[in-house]
Amino acid sequence: MDLAPTIAGKRRVFCCHRATLSGRFIPNSIEAVRECVEARAPRLEIDLWFLRDDAMLIFHDDALDAETTGSGPVEALDRTSARTIRFKQNEGVSSGFLEDVVDAMQGSETILQVDLKQTAPLTPGRVEAMAAALAPIREQVIIGCQAEANLLPFAERGFRIALDPTLHWHFHPNRPPGLTPATLGVHGLWDDAPVAHDDQLRAEAYIDARIRRLVALAPVSEWMVDFWTLRHISGLGRDLGVELARHGIELAAWTLKDRGRQRTAPLLHNLFGVGVTTIITDSPAQLASYVAGGA
């Protein structure tokens, strides 16, 4: 299955979320990464946490309890203790480290999307360690994070960077309290910026103002935005991918589930219509099949 088809005259990419391609391997495992590379997937995504000794673990959640034999926060581990943790799905498999992923990627043309989970400022030592680990494959790496301050040092070192604007701006009805942003704007987006609470400002002007402000935060090549937010913004009169393209920025949508052709195919075409170029999903081949021949 072609995971980089041309749809409506543009190349679109189906990215393997947590390095999941066939589903035969545990997400974010080195085995899953190798499967993507061997299949020549155009792009795969992994999640990265720094541990207390600065080791770089490939893992998604901030706590170990749901997926592994361990418990407590991921950041409390060190390299030695992390090696003892096993996945509940298959206790013969342990989490890998960034260096393992880089080894598996070398010689391939697959793009590696590294989602940096920490939003607290990285120390200079952590920045240097991550940049050094990724250096052998720098040209095929894109580093994403919700905290733009953690992206800037990598841009200065020549890496492509991508912003997930969730900490600034997102749609999430019935959201639990205590999250950032803390306030709900008049146009239905969680947003602490004063412009979000100006009830005299039309929705289109509000969206335009926020795009200009967020684009100025960091020299990113891509935004990574949840698809609910994309649909909400479209309903306010702006197609986010089209607007970002004016700034030379591409748009990735996360994280789409396979809900069958009848429900998923129209959603995909809707997202392509608002300017999405990359779909991040656990079911890349299945979703690509829904739009096959849609050029």
Image (cartoon, rainbow, N blue to C red):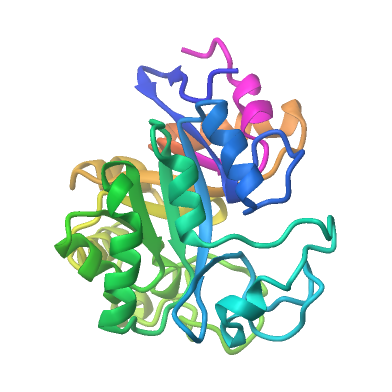
Name the spot of residue 23 as percent of width and height, x first: 74, 39
**Residue 129 quadrant:** bottom left
**Labels in figure, total:** 0
Name the spot of residue 259 as percent of width and height, x first: 76, 38
Name the spot of residue 35 as percent of width and height, x first: 62, 35
Q: Which residue is drawn at 52% across and 80% down?
A: 51
Highlighted range, magenta: 279-295
Q: Residue furthest front?
A: 80
Q: Which residue is drawn at 30% across and 83% down?
A: 194
- Where 11 sits versus 46, above or below? above
Q: Nearer the viewer, residue 142 or 102?
A: 102
- Where 103 sits versus 171, above or below? above
Q: Residue at x 56, y 54 (%)?
A: 228
Does the magenta run of residues contain 151? no
**Residue 66 quadrant:** bottom right
Name the spot of residue 218 as percent of width and height, x first: 21, 65
- Residue 112 visible from this viewpoint: yes
**Residue 9 quadrant:** top left
Left/right placement of residue 148 relative to residue 17 reads left
- Where 123 sits versus 270, above or below? below
Q: Which of 106 and 173 is in front in this view?
A: 106
User: Which image quadrant: the N terminus?
Assistant: top right
- Residue 231 visible from this viewpoint: no
Q: Residue at x 28, y 54 (%)?
A: 135
Q: Nearer the viewer, residue 68 or 185?
A: 68
